[in-house]
Amino acid sequence: MRSENTACSPILGSANELVCVNGIWRQAKQDSSVDYSDGQEEESILRETLEGAADLSWNSAEFGPPYSSWAQEYHLSPLRANLLRGLHLPEGIRVLEVGAGCGAVTRFLGDQGFQVDAVEGSTSRAALARARCADLDNVRIISADFHQLHLPDAGYDLVLFVGVLEYAQRFAPDGLSSRDAVIRMLANATTALAPDGKIIIAIENRLGAKYLAGWPEDHLGTSWSGVAGYPAGAAAKSGIRTFDQAEWKSIFGEMGLQHRSFFPLPDYKLPEAFVSDRGYLAPGANAIWGRYVSVNRTPASPPSTPARFQQNALYRAGLLPSCADSFGIVAARSDESLEGVMPHDWIVFSVKSEAVDKGLCIEAGSSTAGRFPASSPDDPSIILPPGEPIYQYWLRCAVTGVNEEDLSKVLAGHLAIAARSGLRAPGWCLLVNDTGELVPQSFPWPSGCDSAPAADDRSWEESVLDGFFEFAAADLEFNVRIGPWDAPGGLKQQTLQRLSDPPASLADPGKKDSFAAIYWAAGAAFSEEQKSTVQLSQKGKEILTFFLPRSARSDMLLRFDPLDHDIGGNSVTVQLESMRLYPADDSVGVDLMPVFKNDGASSCNQLQIRPSESGVILAIAGNDPWVVVDPAFLGMPPDLTLVKVEAHLDWGSKD
């Protein structure tokens, strides 16, 4: 039976004889469909789910977890759309999606108002894609073999291959090699592009970090097949092949195409984060790739190997572009066509509905973060404290041959300091610096890592440890000197016991960690929400660097707190040798010392300032010392964006 909804025919109809049957377009003389399926039972469940849904949109709450199988999750999860949400795609574009599957990405494209031709070779999957997009007049489902279609010249602004090109050889009609089959599909797509059109590809990386650790290849379920280059045998005969970074560069070079890459994490199938090819070294990026680590998508069990430790090491060495588990690629005829396609260095997507919560992102080239998607240009900036996620650091310690006793000291030491400092944050929010010391600020994950506040220190300590063991359990098994972490007397219990009765080497009850801070405010109402903190050693010379968000401006007052703990009635002095304020795009900075030397400080508390030969002496006389600085005293232009304050202190000065 033919559908009545044939008014809006596919763009493909201009070059092909298509008919519409039950809302699905196909070639009038179509011989057969592509044999690809998740099985009748899975597709039957998907059909019932789609037909029974009141809301078919890409982020419909009806398609959220839990899922009964991997197929259900892959075809229904709103996370699928995150593959494209990090890219700037103009309004109203014409899209050709090759290999639409059951319509998860198709639905997202349609919900953006794009004109979409979605080609799916499997008849049964095309019917499911039609069910997913049944209420969208701007989406046409075409059930056809891509190789049998004629593509209209310059008919599309975007051609999409999501999880398709790894199968290029399997479905190539005339026995081409995998590489040549990919090139032919891309060449056909290029002829269909408008002059400034783009091709988007999502595919696994042959040399992904998890594959280098021996985890099974996603399509074949066997280890090392891709790393070995798919040599002769069952893997080669399957017609499935992925490519590494250098191979893609070679393919695009041969075709005369320019390209940029991005890295959906943990992979393109269910992305929870996005990192651009220029953003993997941006502030906070190590926290992003450190949290969204490799996942196994096959029934086969990964071998016992410290895979997440190895991934951590590769990415820390700057090899994320080479060793990410998945590639996202945007290709075009010219570099100009790729301008602005990736406006963010990285994004953490919210796992909740946009109406309830937002993700986190950093714009390309920025030093501070914001919410994603932004609700207005005036949304406040978010400081990204520098540091490595504590779980990554603990894992690095764990795989280097330490025993339970030594590792429990490391874990308990950090937790004790965090508790004393009032930093009772979820584990993924905790950071350490380059020397392994706890950073006094937590990473601002959306929803605070989705954890409810702990009722007490012991509950919090257990939740942080449980989070670490969930993340690192498989890698911990690799270290024979660490037994089962949750066994009686095991690592978890040893750590908790140290926290219950800490030895002197772990926590000195008379010692309190010290911090310095910079506050900023439009008036005198300084608050904890507008504060940048740095830990103090209070020994010899030290350099303090305070990073500020874009909301800090030169027409605001700054407050410097040199020391934040009770000095017990004693007087403490420190020499401030220099202090510089750095506006955006200014590597020289502005000298703040004239403010201190010439009475430019508008007010002080529990602090006396007196000149010295090498700067000024700050005489601290209480537990809340501070001095307020007005940048206008230095004649700075108003509304400059401030990004950093750097102070040089000398605790051993005799002045």
Image (cartoon, rainbow, N blue to C red):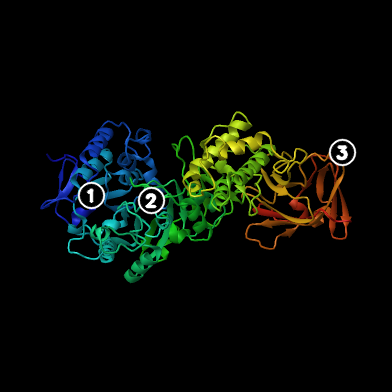
| Residue visible at 52% across and 57% down in the picture | 313
Residue furthest to the top in view is 455
Label 2 and label 3: CA atoms lie apart by: 59 Å
Q: Earlier in the sequence, mark 2 or mark 3?
A: 2
In the image, what residue type sits under mark 1?
Answer: Glu
The quarter of the picture where residue 48 lies is top left
Q: Which of marks 3 and 1 is nearer the N terminus?
A: 1
In the image, what residue type sits under mark 3?
Answer: Gly
- Front position among marks 3 and 1: 3
Label 3 and label 1: CA atoms lie apart by: 77 Å
The answer to which of 460 and 163 lies nearer the viewer is 460
Image quarter where the N terminus lies is top left
- Mark 2: which secondary structure? loop
Numbered disc total:
3
Residue 260, horizontal then vertical, whole percent: 42, 61
Residue 288 lies left or right of residue 534; in this view the side is: left
| Residue visible at 36% across and 63% down in the picture | 332
The answer to which of 266 and 493 lies nearer the viewer is 493
- Mark 1: which secondary structure? strand
The quarter of the picture where residue 210 lies is bottom left
Q: Residue 120 carries which label?
A: 1
Q: Confirm or deny contact between disc 2 and disc 3 (CB under 8 A).
A: no
**Residue at image mark 2:** 268
- The correct choice, above or below, for 252 with respect to 354 in the image is below
**Residue at image mark 3:** 569
Residue 22, horizontal then vertical, whole percent: 16, 40
Residue 641, horizontal then vertical, whole percent: 64, 53
The answer to which of 546 and 114 lies nearer the viewer is 546
